Image: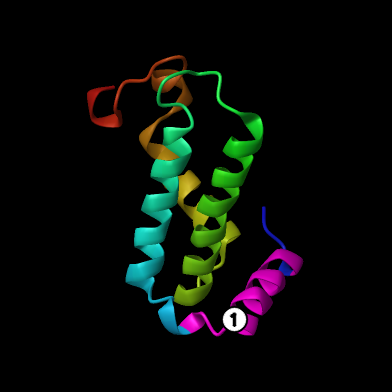
Amino acid sequence: MTNETVRDALRAFVGERDWAQFHSPENLAKSVSIEAAELLECFQWSSDADPDRVRDELADVLTYCLLLADRLGEDPDSIVLEKLARTREKYPVEKAHGRSTKYDQL
């Protein structure tokens, strides 16, 4: 999903600006939420959102997620795959296929 080039580019960008001092896990988590709200705002009044704006806001969400994972010393690919494995157990195909029912109601 991610690669060292992206991680290194983000680290360099933050380092050049001395912004790591502001990147506590709490602040980065808040930023993820704020940027996710801005992404949602793209669709507030219509499902026909401006694709360029959606890409920009999605990039902001992903950027803060990657920065938070880096700050916590977590590998984004590993944590996504680990969570997917746990979710796969909660939502077996034979029960969940084509359904949006929460796992405890399947």
Rendering coords of residue 29 (x, y %): 37, 62
The magenta region covers 5-20
Q: Amino acid at mark 1?
A: Arg
Q: Magenta part mainly helix, strand or loop?
A: helix
Percent from the top left, x then y, of residue 50?
60, 28
Q: Residue furthest left?
A: 105
**Picture quadrant of residue 52:** top right
Is-magenta flag for residue 15?
yes
- Please say whether residue 88 is visible from this viewpoint: no
Is residue 29 rendered magenta in the image? no
From the viewer's side, name the closer residue of 104 and 30. 30
Relative to residue 8, is residue 35 depicted above or below? above
How many numbered marks appear?
Answer: 1
Q: Secondary structure at mark 1?
A: helix
Residue in view at x 34 percent, y 60 percent: 30
| Residue holding disc 1 | 17
User: Who's the residue at 41% across and 39% down the image?
Assistant: 89
Query: Residue at the location (50% across, 18% down)?
Result: 47
Q: Quadrant of the C terminus?
A: top left
Q: In the rendered image, is residue 38 in sight?
A: yes
Snapshot colouring: rainbow
Answer left or right for 28 relative to 60.
Answer: left
Q: Nearer the viewer, residue 19 or 101?
A: 19
Above or below residue 106? Residue 52 is: below
Q: Note whether 83 is above or below 42 in the view shown.
A: below
Across and down, in percent, residue 91 comes to 40, 31
Q: For the view shown, which residue lies furthest in the right direction?
A: 5
